[in-house]
């Protein structure tokens, strides 16, 4: 394997974050979360990525030094076997003995925090650096976007395979398994990183007919019946029939970066109400493309789209029904599913060129099913550019 990112890019990310540390009087950052570690180093390891406010970073791991050296441009990769060795590395990482340490508190367990607090960073003041890390990660480089384009291409291929494979009598579960297999052949890693510890995601959802409107247990617009109480959503053993919508929502990972995409299919004549819902979803996408420009806030975009959706006679089914409605229309995406920014109420995050957002206005109609598409977009000066290219209209089979 070769490096995913040039040394200049990785060190550019580190230097940008060091500027934040300096401006906020944080002496050192300890990166412990896999997604953040991958962003700052180009790979992951069993240990900690240490970024002093000034000076070279240290990749301190328990094992696998040679593997890391072959996959990351970081020059200082060291092994620690004892907590005392890790403590020594942290105390001597910067130009002065650190007094203030930054960690991502949203993704650290209590036991690991206590380990750092009592055995490694004694008498240091802890500061939460999760939001600054996520804000920096939200703006993608050209090399990151190129990887996400590749993930989107895998999604487009999967939908083209679905078009050929779907037929009456096929179960959702078998269709999903076939599509997962095809995605794997094209390079899908199969891993979906999520920052929210209460949200679990696999390949995506393959939902059909009325059962497709079964709400999710999580904060997602679609759910489905699933096949087990252990993960009670997604595809089931339901047989796909003529005259009903099939919603295929794929979450694909290429070289650590994700593409989130949904398309609708139907065997034969589709239900009129779901067709109306799909057409409304497409019009909302057009509005998003035009309005999601640098300088707008995520909350402003949410309000604009929601007000337009309220004009639809099907608004009661928009993003769920009753207490099962979700409170967002889109989410940042990249290394993780739930990145900044969120297209949600009162979000003050300012859109910037290079941000990548999965936008998913959907209608969940009890007794009929799910309609609506999702694209992964990159924010450009003129608006949002979709990375997905598979036709957005209903694919009739």
Image (cartoon, rainbow, N blue to C red):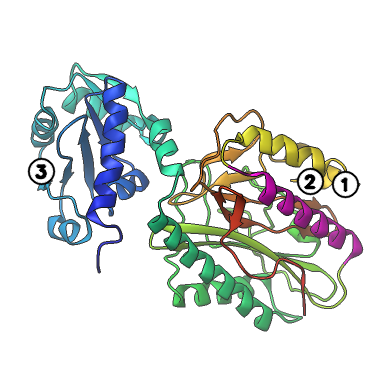
The magenta segment is: 271-293
Residue 109: say if magenta. no
**As rendered, which of 162 and 233 lies closer to the eye?**
162
Residue 361 location, x and y as percent?
Answer: 72, 50
**Mark with earlier residue (3, 1):** 3
| Res. 222 mark | none
Identify the residue shown where x is 19% and y is 56%.
68
Mark 3 Cα shell of 10 Å, populated few (<14), some (14-19), many (≥20):
few
Query: For the residues marked 3 and 1, what is the alpha-carbon distance in whole angstroms?
Result: 61 Å
Q: Mark 2 and mark 1 in contact (Cβ < 8 Å)?
A: yes
Tell me: residue 13, above or below residue 248.
above
Tell me: residue 151, above or below residue 102.
below
- The residue indicated by pointer 3 is 81
27 relative position to 174: left or right = left
Residue 273: say if magenta. yes
Q: Secondary structure at mark 3?
A: loop
Residue 300 location, x and y as percent?
Answer: 67, 33
- The residue indicated by pointer 1 is 312
């Amino acid at each position: 394997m070769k490096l995913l990112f040039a040394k200049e890019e990785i060190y550019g990310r580190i230097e940008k974050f060091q500027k934040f540390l300096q401006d906020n009087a944080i002496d050192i950052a300890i990166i412990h979360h896999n997604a953040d570690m991958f962003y700052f180093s180009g790979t992951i390891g069993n240990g900690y990525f240490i970024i002093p406010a000034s000076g070279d970073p240290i990749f301190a791991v328990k094992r696998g030094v040679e593997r890391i050296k072959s996959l990351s441009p970081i020059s200082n990769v060291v092994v620690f076997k004892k907590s005392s060795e890790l403590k020594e590395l942290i105390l001597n990482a910067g130009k002065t003995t650190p007094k203030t340490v930054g960690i991502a508190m949203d993704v650290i367990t209590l036991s690991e925090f206590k380990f750092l607090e009592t055995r490694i960073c004694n008498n240091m003041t802890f500061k939460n650096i999760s939001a600054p890390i996520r804000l920096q990660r939200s703006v993608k480089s050209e090399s990151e976007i190129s990887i996400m384009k590749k993930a989107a291409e895998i999604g487009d291929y999967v939908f083209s395979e679905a078009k050929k494979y779907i037929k009456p009598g096929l179960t959702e579960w078998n269709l999903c398994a076939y599509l997962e297999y095809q995605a794997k052949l094209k390079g899908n890693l199969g891993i979906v990183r999520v920052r929210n510890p209460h949200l679990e995601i696999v390949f995506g959802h393959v939902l059909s007919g009325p059962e497709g409107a079964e709400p999710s247990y999580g904060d997602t617009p679609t759910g489905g019946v699933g096949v087990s109480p252990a993960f009670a959503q997604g595809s089931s053993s339901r047989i796909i029939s003529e005259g009903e919508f099939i919603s295929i929502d794929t979450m694909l990972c290429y070289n650590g970066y994700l593409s989130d995409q949904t398309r609708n299919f139907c065997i034969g004549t589709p239900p009129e109400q779901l067709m109306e819902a799909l057409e409304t979803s497409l019009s909302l996408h057009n509005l998003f493309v035009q309005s999601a420009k640098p300088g707008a806030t995520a909350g402003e975009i949410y309000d604009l789209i929601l007000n337009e959706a309220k004009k639809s006679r099907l608004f009661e089914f928009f993003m769920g029904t009753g207490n099962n409605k979700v409170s967002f229309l889109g989410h940042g995406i990249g290394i993780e599913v739930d990145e900044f920014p969120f297209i949600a109420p009162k979000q003050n995050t300012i859109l910037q060129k290079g941000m990548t957002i999965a936008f998913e206005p959907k209608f969940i109609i009890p007794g009929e099913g799910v309609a609506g598409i999702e694209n992964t977009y990159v924010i450009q000066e003129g608006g949002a550019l979709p990375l997905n290219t598979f036709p957005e209209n209903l694919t009739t089979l």
